[in-house]
Amino acid sequence: MNRNTNFDILPDRYLFKEIAIRASLYKEQHPDQRLLRMGVGDVSLPLPPAIIEAMHRAVEDLAYSNTFRGYGPEEGYEWLRQAVIDNEYTPLGISLDIDEVFISEGAGSDLGNLSELFDSKNSVAILDPSYPAYMDSSMMAGRKIIPLPCTIENGFVPDLPRQKADIIYLCLPNNPTGTVLRRAELQRWVDYAIDNHSIIIFDAAYEAYIEEDDVPHSIYELDGAQKVAIEVRSFSKSAGFTAVRCGYTVVPKETGLQAMWMRRQCTKYNGTSYVAQRAAMATFTPAGKRGINANLAYYKRTALIIAGGLTALGYEVYGGENAPYIWCKTPDNMTSWDFFDFLLNECQVLCTPGVGFGPSGEGFVRFSAFSQREDSEEALLRIKNGFRETLCVRPNLSR
Ligand code: MLT
């Protein structure tokens, strides 16, 4: 047996696991301290009653022989795939066939698994910084990586790859920087993919946070995108399903990959839980929509409060307007991990070190707006007081 030695070049631990371990170590050593969690993008509000009721009903279905279900279709129940098209794509003027929509257990696994559709020699362009699963899964597969730096200088909008990229991961609104692309800017990426026979894996997990009109919610709003893009979406951040686990991936037939993805899923995936799919279906009912929109409004407001609060404290802050993430420059050129440790030890605030998202994230940290409002406000207060009480480090208030 030869091990896959591509694992040897990965960081020892996945970014969010590393943070979770550091947080539990801190809790073990300081059991009386209350940690304010603004690290991983995990939701904190309870699910709306309409969704909970749908899940209860689904559990009851499994209790009686006349409503019992066993394995469902690997690609998801037709009623949910049709509801996705009717509610998410038809209103945008996008036409999809039902067999182009695949229900999943969430975006994370599909984003990595999709790479199985491509030759191992294919190169991958990845924004730097970006959600670490793109980089980690591409490295596990031993692919050539083309990093696309996103910096203050380029407004966190990368240039098109200078060399041919076969696969391109795009996440918009962006995790972690919160950047969005306007219609014309995104069209350039679609045109690049058409010209270079590339495929774009478009992570739209945060589309529900878009507030501006000229920002596309789906890549299929752009001309020609159904030829060159796979879109991955999740109910996790739009409907608070991080525990429930449900999402979907659109693989248009025009990409030439739809039948391959179906083949892959039937072999390696036994379908999303019936209860989770019933919960997802409830997000499209009037009561479900009201509930999730209220939760979204809460997180969006929290993002603005965090961004505004940090700015008022003198920090250089990006994002938070079309995304639930705030991308914050560290004070006094501290490294991302040093500032992470400072916030953890002095303020008991958990963030995510920017360098964990890629080398260009060095010198930044990311705050998530998914915490309870009182916790975010308390975190801002602690950050303010933490610096007052710590003589060695201060934010650059001159900016
Ligand atoms: C994040 O914090 O970047 C993500 O929400 C974690 C995830 O979706 O896996």
Image (tube, rainbow, N blue to C red):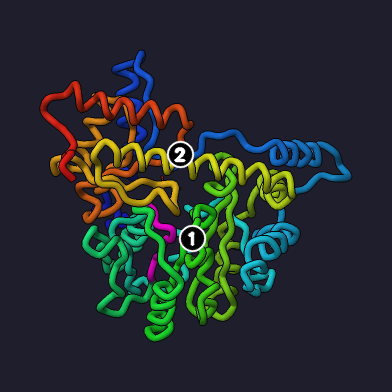
Q: Which mark is residue 302?
A: 2
Q: Which mark is residue 262?
A: none
Q: Amino acid at mark 1?
A: Glu
- The quarter of the rendered structure image containing the C terminus is top left
Image spot of residue 369 (x, y percent): 43, 40
Rendered residue at 52%/61% (across/down): 232
Q: Amino acid at mark 2?
A: Thr
Residue 178 falls within the magenta-colored stretch: no
- Circles 1 and 2 in contact, beta carbons < 8 Å: no
Q: Nearer the viewer, residue 86 or 107?
A: 86
For ligand 1, tell me if the residue under mark 1 lies within 8 Å: no
Q: Which mark is residue 212?
A: 1
Crowd rating for badge 2 (residues with CA inside 10 Å; few <14, some 14–19, many 20+): many
Rendered residue at 70%/52% (across/down): 284
Rendered residue at 58%/46% (across/down): 245
Residue 48 placement, left or right of 17: right
The extreme left residue here reads: 392
- The quarter of the rendered structure image containing the N terminus is bottom left
Q: Which callout, 1 or 2, points at the residue further toward the start of the chain?
A: 1
The extreme top residue here reads: 32
Tally of numbered tags: 2
Q: Considering the numbered disc 2 on the image, is that residue within a helix, a strand or a loop?
A: helix
Q: Which residues are magenta?
A: 168-175
Q: Is residue 257 above or below residue 386?
A: below
**Between marks 1 and 2, how big is the CA–CA gap?**
18 Å
Image spot of residue 21 (x, y percent): 33, 32
